Image (tube, coloured by chain):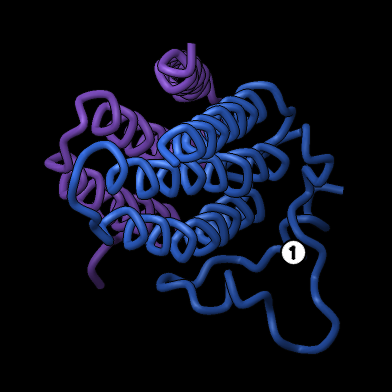
Chain colours: A purple, B blue
Amino acid sequence: MSGMILPTALGFAFVCVSLSILLTLFRLWRGPLSADRILAVDTLTINAIAMIVLFGIAYTTPDYFEAALLLAMVGFVATVAYCKFLLRGDIIE
Amino acid sequence: MTLVAQIVVSFLLVLGGGFILVGSWGLAKLPSVMTRLHGPTKATTLGVGACLIGSMIYFPFFGGAWSAHELLITLFLFLTAPVSANLIAKAHLHRQGRRIDANPSDQIVDGLPAPTGTADWATFGGAKTPEPSVPEQATGKN
């Protein structure tokens, strides 16, 4: 009985993160403004980090955390670059 | 002890999944960009933080080695989420003030009102190519 707690919670979290990725993809497809799409890409990166962490728990391997850390850094830099491009029309001035 | 760890990790995972879902639901549901910013930057970040802390508690009990990677990712996300939200809001205000992206849901279709004093908004004042300022464009339409 007690062995079922963690797999159930893990399945619930997987379902939630998958639905979140679908909702974020809807906003990325639909979003009328550029700021919406940048926000959707940023949220998609964060959801991907959550998915990687959940896979790390499901397979009980710590190998995925470097990927999550790299994705966090690259996602932040990408968001900053997109916003900079919208603000100035140029990324590296 | 293992049961307590299981319950704590399960609670954190369920909490994190719920917050991530609420944040993305807000991103898909809310009416304008400025309201859509709230969901992902607050709820989703908190949810990912809960998932990562749950993972950090999980590994010493069930996987073996403890690692600080999760704490590092959590700190990095909590530091960068407000910065990226601020940049997205700034870019949106800039484009809305320049009438590139008018968003009627924000109910400020005429762009930002001029600040008191001689200086323009900092978002527009430091622009690379000088264009007509926002109040002139706003009065030109009315």
Residue A6 is drawn in which quadrant? top left
Residue A56 is drawn in which quadrant? top left
Q: Residue furthest left?
A: A63
Residue B33 is left or right of residue A39, and the answer is right
Tell me what residue is drawn at x 61 percent, y 66 percent: B132
Q: Residue furthest bottom?
A: B118
Task: Find residue B82 and report its horizontal and vertical position in percent.
Answer: 55, 61
Residue B36 is drawn in which quadrant? top right
Question: Taking the image as drawn, is residue B53 in sight?
Answer: yes
For label 1, the crowd category at 10 Å Cα-Cα, with few meaning under 14, some 14 to 19 and many 20 or more, is few
Tell me what residue is drawn at x 37 percent, y 51 percent: A79
Question: Taking the image as drawn, is residue A89 in sight?
Answer: no
Instruction: Please state which of residues A74 and B89 is positioned toward the viewer in this rendering.
Output: A74
Task: Find residue B106 and report its horizontal and vertical position in percent.
Answer: 78, 40
Residue that badge 1 annotates: B136
Task: Find residue A41 and report its horizontal and vertical position in percent.
Answer: 39, 36
- Tell me if residue A82 comes above or below residue B31 in the rendering: below
- Which corner quadrant holds the N terminus of chain B? top left
- Tell me if residue B89 comes above or below residue A54 in the rendering: below
Q: Chain of mark 1?
A: B
